Image (tube, rainbow, N blue to C red):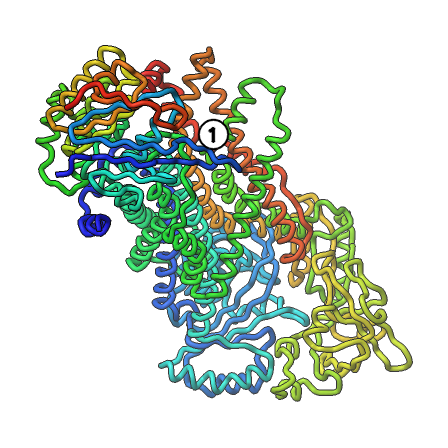
Amino acid sequence: MIEYVIKIKRKTKSIFQDGWVWRMAWRDARHNFFRLLLFASSLTTGIAAVVAIGSLNYSLRNDLDRNAKELLGADFVANGNKAFEREIRAAFDSTEFEQASERELASMVLFSHTRQTRLVRVVGLEGNFPFYGEVGTLPSDAYSKIKGGGYAMLDESLASQYEVSSGDTLRIGNREFLVSGVVQKWPGSSGILTTFTPSVYISDAELDSTGLIQYGSRVSYKQYFKTNSDKDVEDLTKKLRPLLRKYGHGFDTVEERKEELGEGFQSVYRFFSLLAFVALLLGCIGVASSVHIYATEKREEVAVLRCVGSSGWQAFNIFFIQVFLLGILASIAGSLIGLGIQQAIPYVFKDFMPMELDFMISWGSVVEGIILGVVVSILFTILPLVIIRFVPPLSVLRSDYKQKRVFSKTRLTAIILIILFPFIAAAYQTSNWLVGIAFTIGIALALFSLAGVAIALLWVVRKFFPKKSGFVFRHALSNLFRPNNQTRVLMVSIGLGAFIIATLSITQSSLLGQVEFTGNENQSNTILFDIQPSQIEGVVKLIKEHNLPANQTVPIVTCRLSSIKGRTVDVIQKDTVDRLPNWALTREYRVTYRDSLHVSEELIKGKVHQITGRDSVWVTISEGMQDNLRVDVGDSLIFDVQGVPIPVRISGIRKVDWSQDPPNFIFVFPRGVLEQAPQIWVATTRVDDPQVANRFQQELVMGFPNVSLIDLRLILSTINELFDKIGMVVRFLALFSIITGLVVLAGAVMNSKYVRIKENVLLRTIGARTNQIMKITLIEYTYLGLFSALTGVLLSVIAGFFLTKFFFEITFSLNYLELFLIGLGVVILTVSIGWFNSREVISTPPLQILRKES
Amino acid sequence: MPDIILQAEELTKIYKSGEKDLTVLDSVSFSATQGNSLSIIGPSGSGKTTLLGLCAGLDVPTRGTVSLMGFKLNVMDEDDRAYIRNQFVGFVFQNFQLLSTLTALENVMVPLELRGDKGVEPKAAELLARVGLGDRMDHYPAQLSGGEQQRVAMARAFITDPKILFADEPTGNLDEENAKHVTDILFQLNKEQQTTLVLVTHNLELAKRTQRILTMRGGRLVEEKILSTV
C-alpha cells in the first residue's frame, strides 16, 4: 500500500512541463558553452554542405525550366553525321517553319599573327540561329559580321589561349578570315565543352570555299526549326522521326534536351548530395563521440542530482535539452552558411553549366536542412546520453562503482533508428530506395574499412612501439592511446577527407597514364588525318623533312553496312522482335586494309583477315562491335562502299586496345579488295620538340590545308585541365569532410583538455620544460595527422586499384608527389587545429592548476 | 507520527567478484528514531559506507529490508527512491559533491526546485547566511575553499528540512579549524530541525558527539554504544 501511495504522489512531468530541467540545462550550459558549440559545429558543416547542394539543385531546376528553349536555341533540331538525304531535305522544305542550318567539322586553324596552329571545330552557320536566347559576343556585332562573309569568330577560351583579338587574321583551309570577335556565350554550350573542343564560327556559305570538305571528311549536320507552338513540335516530330530514323539521323526537342540535362544534373546532384551527406554523417559520428565523453564526464554530477532526488529521465533531459537546442542552432547556422556557400557554387560549377546560374534561396532546402539537423542531433546524441539515465546514485560514495548493464528501450530504439537513418535519408535525398541501400552499404563499408585501417595502424604502432626513441617522441606517441582521446574517430573522419581527395588523384593519374606518351619512345603522339591519296606522298615527305618518323600510314575507306547474315539493314530495322541498335546499323564505318594484326590488336577467335578462293573476302571485327551486331566467325555481311556492294565473311574477332598507337579499327579488310575504292589516309608520327612541332604544323597547314592534325600532347593537357576543373568541385566537397574532421578534432582536444592539463602539470612538476611540453603536443598532432592521412591514403590506394582495374579498366598508376602533398596538407591542418586549441593547456601555469585540482 | 525514522533489518549485501561471492555486509539490523544522532565507525572495508548507501536508498540490499519513514526502500525502483530522498533525506559527503557549474546559491536551491517549489531563493540565501556564506552566494565551487564548499553542501542538505541526514566523513577533507566549524554547524542544525543524523566516520572525537555509536567490523555490526539519550 505504501508503494501505491508513492506512485500516486510522484507525478512524472514531461520535459516541457518540468521547468527545473530547463533551468538546470541553462545553468550547466553556461560553463560548457564553447565546448557544446564545438559539438554543434561538426553538425553545422554537414548541414551547410547538404543545404548548399540542395539549394543548388533547386536553382538548377528552376533555371532549367526558365531557360529550356535557350538550351537548344530552337524548338526542334535534326542532326546527323552525313548530309541529309534528298527525301529528308524535301520534308524539311515542305514545312512552313523558320529554319537555320549548321555544318561542322574538325580542322586545323592557323593564327596568322603568331603562326601557331590548333585543331578546332569549324562551324558553318546559316540562318537566324539561335531562335531563342542569344549568342553573346565581344564586340556585340561579331556574329552579324560573319553572316556578311569574310569574318570568323572564335570561342573566348581559344582566343585568350592564342592571344587572338578582333582584326587579327586566321587561316582555315584555303581561306583567310578576319576575326570579328570572340564568343562568350553559345546556347547550350558550357565552358568545359569549349575547353575540349574550341570552335571557330564562319558563315556556312563560305565553308565550301575553304576546301575542307572533301571525300572522307567527317562533317556533322544540323537543321534547326522554330515552330509556333508545342503542338507544332509534336507534328514535326511525327513527320520527321521515321525519315530521320530510316537514314540513321537523330533529332532533339526542347523537352528531350531538358530531360537529358535534367537527368544529367540529377545524377551529378545525387553524387554531390551523397558526398555532402557523408560530411553530415561524419559530423554525426563526431557529435556522438563527443557527447559520449561529455556524458561520461557528467556522471559524477548526475550521481549527485540522483542523490538529491532527480529521476533518471530528469537528469537525462538536462543534457538532452542542451544538445537538442544546440542541434537546432547548429542546423540554422549550417543552413545559413549553406546559403552563403551556394553563392560561391556557381563560380565553382560555372564551367559545367550550359547556362548562367541565378542565385536563388530555396527555403525548402533550408527547412529540410534544419529538420535534418534536428533529427540527427536527436538520433546521434540519445544513444551516448542514455547512460545518464542509469547513473547509480551510489557513485557519489564510490566513484569506482561499476554501473550495471541495463536494458533500455530508448537505447535499442536509438540503435535501430541510427541504422535506418542513412538508408532512409539517402533514399529520400536521391528519391531512390536502391540508391539508399547501396549508399548505406557503401558508406558502412567505407567507414568500416577506414576504421579497420585505423585500428590496424594503431595496432602496428602499439606492437612495434619505439621503446628506444627519445622521451618526447615516445610520450607524444603514447598520448594517442590516452583514454577518451578519440584517436580512432579522428583518424576515420579526417582520413575520409584524405581518402576522397587521394582517390581522385589516383584516378586522375591513372587516366592520364593512358594518354601519356612521353614514356614510350616508339609510340606516336601526332596523328594526321583527312589526307587525300594524292597528298600522302607529300605529307610523308614533309614528315621526313623535319626529321620525324612516319610511324604509320594507314588508308581509310568509308562504307556502310547494307546486309547482315543475309538480312538487309532495312529488314533488320523493321524487325521489332530481334532488334539491333540502329546506330550500329546506319553508321558510317571507317575501315582499313592490311594483312597482319596491329600492335594494339590480339586475335581472340578465328583467323586473321584474308582472301581465300576467288571472291571470298574474310574480314576481322573488333570484340565489342561483334556483340552489338550479334555476329560471329563465319557470318556474312555486305558493305556498301560508295555504292558498290562488297560481300564479306567474318574470319576472326580482334581484341583492340583502343588507346594504344591509334588509329584502330572496327573492321579490317585484307589487302587486294579496297585499294581502288575512294579513300583517305592517316599518318602518324612522333614529335617531341615543341618548336619542331610548331614549324611542322605551320608548314602542314600551309601546304595541305585540308589535312588535320591531332596533337595528343594537347589532349593530355586538355584532360589535365578537365580533371583540374572536376577535381576542384570534388575537392570542394571533400573539404567539408576534412573541415568536419578538424572540428571533431577541436572538440576532442577540448574534451581531453583537463586530462592534458593534469598531464602537463605532472610533467612540469617532475621537471619538464615548456619547450618539451610544446614539442610533445606538436609531435602528438603530427602523429595524429600522419596516421589520419595514412589511413585515408592507404585505403585510397586500395580503392584506386579496384576502381582503375575493374571500373575504368585502365592501368593503375600513382602520383607519389601528389599523394605526399595530400598527406602533408592533412598533417599541417591537423597540427594547426590541435595546436590552436591546446594553447591554453600549454600556457596555463602549474600552480593555478594545482590549486584548482586541490 | 512514527518515532522510528529508519529501520534496517537483516541487511546483507553480496557482490559478485568473478566466480566468488563477496559479502560486504552481513545481517545488520538497527534503527534510528526522530532527532536521534548516531555514528557508524569501523576500520576501512568494514562495510560502513555500504550500510550508509543502503540506508539512504542509494543501493538495494541482497537480503533484508530498509524502511525509511515507513517506506520500504528495497521494493521500490530507483526513481521512487530518488523521490523519497528528495522528500525526506539530506546528504553531506566527504568530497562535498557540489555541482561545479552552479553557484553556491543555485546548489542550495536544487533540492527544493526539484520538488517544484517556487520562490526558494530567499530560503536558500538565508541558509547560506546561517552557515556564514552570505557574501559568497554567487561564487562557484571552484572559487570556494574546502570548508566553504562543505558549508554549502550542508545548506543544501538542510534546505528541505530533511527527516534524516546522512553524512559520510563530513570532515574527512578539512583541516582542524574548518572541521570544527563544519561539525558545529552540523550538530546545531540537527538540533534545531530535529533531524535524525546518521554519520559515518573514522574520527572518534566526532563520533562521540552523537548519541549512539555503532561499530562495524568485517561487514557485521559488532558493537552498539549508547552515549546519551535525546
Q: Position of residue A727 (x, y in %)?
A: 51, 48
Element under disc 1: helix
Q: Name the residue located 52 percent from the left edge and 87 percent from the top edge.
A: A90
A805 and A698: which is toward the camera: A805
Chain under numbered label 1: A
Snapshot quadrant of residue A148: bottom left
Judge from the rendering whether residue B186 lies leftward or rightward of residue A112; answer left or right.
Answer: left
Q: Amino acid at mark 1?
A: Val
Residue A320 shows in this picture:
no
Q: Position of residue A69 (x, y in %)?
A: 39, 71
Q: Name the residue located 39 percent from the left edge and 28 percent from the top edge.
A: B219
Depicted A632 relative to depicted A136: above or below? below
Residue A843 shows in this picture:
yes
B145 and A837: which is toward the camera: B145
Task: Please identify the quadrant where the C terminus of chain B is shown.
Answer: top left
Depicted A562 relative to depicted A709: above or below? below
Q: Name the residue located 50 percent from the left edge and 68 percent from the top edge.
A: A203
Q: Position of residue B125 (x, y in %)?
A: 11, 27
Which residue ends up furthest to the right in the rendered image? A613
Judge from the rendering whether residue B111 lies leftward or rightward of residue A344; answer left or right.
Answer: left
Judge from the rendering whether residue A852 lies leftward or rightward of residue A701; answer left or right.
Answer: left
Residue, disc 1: A831
Depicted A249 relative to depicted A467: above or below? below
Snapshot quadrant of residue A624: bottom right
